[in-house]
Amino acid sequence: MAREESDGRPALPATGWAVLGLLSFGEELSGYDLKKWADYSLRFIYWSPSFSQIYGELKRLESVGYVASRQVAQETGSRDKRVYTITDEGMDAVRTWARTAPVDPPVLKHNPMMRLWLGHLLEAEQARDVLERHRAYAETMREQAEADARDSAGEPAWRYPQLMLRWAERYYAAERDLADGMLKDLRELGGPGGEQAE
């Protein structure tokens, strides 16, 4: 028997709400489209679900009446594809979730900082390398968020996702700047990767 929320609605995992949320913008989307849209936006703030997660959630959402699907013939002559739309019940559920879900604090799992925490176990230059690679990653993500926000400009349905993309741009800029600060701290500290190491 499926778990239920206190108001009797089916309980969904975060992936289910993410998929339902992607459909709430009103487009009829295939699983491939949903993955593309998740890569375009959700990956900056949560994660990008795999195809298997997306299709698993679509099956669950359809079984509880939150989405409907139909087969659509492809223009290219390849096999038909299944597309999904949110139902009125699904829209009501995701609206209720967006309005009433607890504002849980984000869970920080910062692998580069975990590695640096264990700096006493690293060889010379490894700590610096970890920070430099993290800095490069953060700057790449900042540039991608900036480009995605720019590309979504003028799309009325994407006003709020665009705000989130601007937040992501600032977040990754801060991560880049924090890495720069940690590289400076490392030089002053000495030890693995620091210029003052003996």
Image (tube, helix red, strand yellow):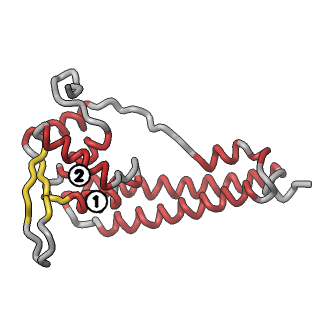
Element at badge 2? helix
Q: Which amino acid does label 1 sit on?
A: Trp
Say whether marks 2 and 1 touch (CB < 8 Å). yes
Q: Position of residue 3 (x, y in %)?
A: 23, 26
Mark 1 packing: few (<14 Cα in 10 Å), some, or many (20+)?
Answer: some
Q: What residue type is labelled 2?
A: Leu
Residue under the point 52% across and 58% down: 173
Element at badge 1? helix
Quadrant of the rendering where the N terminus is positioned: top left
Q: Position of residue 133 (x, y in %)?
A: 62, 61
Against 17, residue 139 (above or below) is: below
Residue under the point 39% across and 54% down: 43
Quadrant of the rendering where the C terminus is positioned: bottom right
Front one among 15 and 190: 15
Residues at marks 2 and 1, CA–CA distance in whole angstroms: 7 Å
Front one among 63 and 44: 63
Q: Mark 2 points at which residue?
A: 22
Q: Which of marks 2 and 1 is nearer the N terminus?
A: 2
Instruction: Report how many numbered discs are placed on residues in the image.
Output: 2
Residue under the point 11% across and 52% down: 85
Mark 2 packing: few (<14 Cα in 10 Å), some, or many (20+)?
Answer: many
Q: Mark 1 points at which residue?
A: 37
Q: Where is residue 100 in the image (x, y as percent from the top left)?
A: 25, 30
Q: Name which quarter of the figure residue 183 lies in.
A: bottom right
Q: Name which quarter of the figure residue 146 lies in.
A: bottom left
Q: Which mark is residue 191?
A: none
Horizontal placement of 150 versus 193: left or right?
A: left
